[in-house]
Amino acid sequence: MALKIAVLAETAPGETRVAAIAETVKKYVALGAQVAVEEGAGAAAAIGDGEFAAAGASLGSRSAVLAGAGIILGVSGPEPDALGGAERGALLIGALDPVRRGAAIEAYAAAGLQALAMEWMPRITRAQSMDVLSSQSNLAGYKAVIDGAAAYGRAFPMMMTAAGTISPARVFVMGVGVAGLQAIATARRLGAQVTATDVRSATREQIQSLGAKPIFVENVAGIEGEGTGGYATETSEEYRRAQAELVSGHLAKQDIVITTALIPGRPAPRLIADAQIASMRPGSVIVDLAADAGGNVEGTRVGERVERHGVTILGPANLARSLPADASALFARNVYNFLAAFWDGDAGGPVLPDDDEIVRGIRVTKDGAVVNERLLAARPAG
């Protein structure tokens, strides 16, 4: 009997994405799987039930979709009580937020589910096509610039008119990961004058390659900031003082600032303090992409627009959700690429070796227990 893959409708507040699209449904069917999609799952992403049906999926209620499923796909981790009827041993795949949703993870384990947190995908070469953090951050970086431009109230590019010249907007990107790089590229395409900074010195060339000017602290120990897998780490106290001084002088001249700095497993680092906001010009805009993790900016409120010292601070919650069709397509392809890489035709489904680096990275629960080393290490002692 063919392995059944269940695609759930999202129930998390504000979630607009879906974990499969017609393209990936066809690919799962080609692998020999049966795909069942919860009715209305793709509505917010402009994917109708008919599109899923034409791709080879069956449609039904949540209970019907879950019945007999060996793989359960979601975007945001579903609440455990919404998984009634799920088979013990089934794979639950999505962005599960394991650290902040500890009770849900324990419930997944108790239900016998093998939970796989896609956002913990190792950043290694063979996992690039499976990296949901990168695909979603790319969209978030783009949308941050668009939202910042909408809130700014002035034009981005230089305009020379009979009535005079309009100067280009000045955009400063703080944190040059995937989101930051896309923010730089987007702001440049809109005609802004762009500068950027990061604690990882290796990003200097990336900034320059996109036509932006790098803003870096020079001749201070501990500025590399390069952590495992390309993530940033915490920096030295000397560096933080020098960085704050450099940024303060630069911020006062900026029109739009986009902050993207995150440290895995820790609260977002504070990059902009209230006094620095006060130094900015009235009408300036800050977009804080780290709002969900506590924010890079003092005064950020998740999901809200705040006015502070005449400066608008946007604290969007998961900006990729505001582009649901594209975000769903990229997320769905990431998930398919993962499953296809481990698919065993003879077994009729994915085989996940315990010693595989990818499997170790994303597997959170197995055989009724929490097994992920990173999650266990994050638990309070005792």
Image (spheres, grey):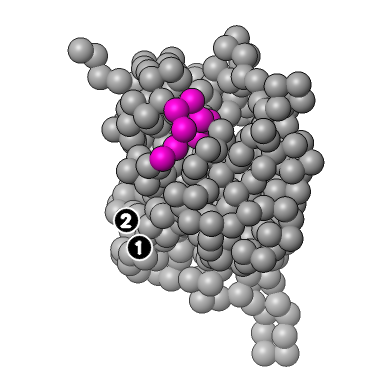
At x 69% / y 38%, what residue is drawn? 33
At x 35% / y 62%, what residue is drawn? 304
Could you tell me what secondary structure mostly forms the magenta stretch? loop
The answer to whether residue 173 is seen in the rendering is no
Q: Is residue 335 above or below residue 15?
A: above
At x 69% / y 63%, what residue is drawn? 51
Which residue is labeled 2 in the image? 301
| Mark 1 secondary-structure assignment | loop
Residue 140 horizontal side relative to residue 273, left or right: right
Q: Is residue 203 above or below residue 211?
A: above
Asked whether the beta carbons under mark 2 and mark 1 sit within 8 Å of each other, the answer is yes
Which residue is labeled 1 in the image? 304
* The residue positioned farthest toward the left in the image shown: 382
Closer to us: 257 or 87: 87
Q: Is residue 62 above or below residue 1?
A: below
Cα distance, mark 2 to mark 1?
A: 5 Å
Closer to us: 31 or 121: 31
Q: Position of residue 369 (x, y in %)?
A: 37, 18
Closer to us: 266 or 65: 65
Find the magenta span and give its range: 85-92
| Mark 2 secondary-structure assignment | loop
Q: Position of residue 290 (x, y in %)?
A: 43, 46
Which amino acid lies under the numbered mark 2 shown in the image of this protein?
A: Arg
Q: Quadrant of residue 175?
A: top right
* The residue positioned farthest toward the right in the image shown: 30
Label 1 crowding class (10 Å Cα cut-off): few <14, some 14-19, many 20+? few
Which amino acid lies under the numbered mark 1 shown in the image of this protein?
A: Glu
Q: Position of residue 228 (x, y in %)?
A: 55, 20
**Residue 89 counted in the magenta span:** yes
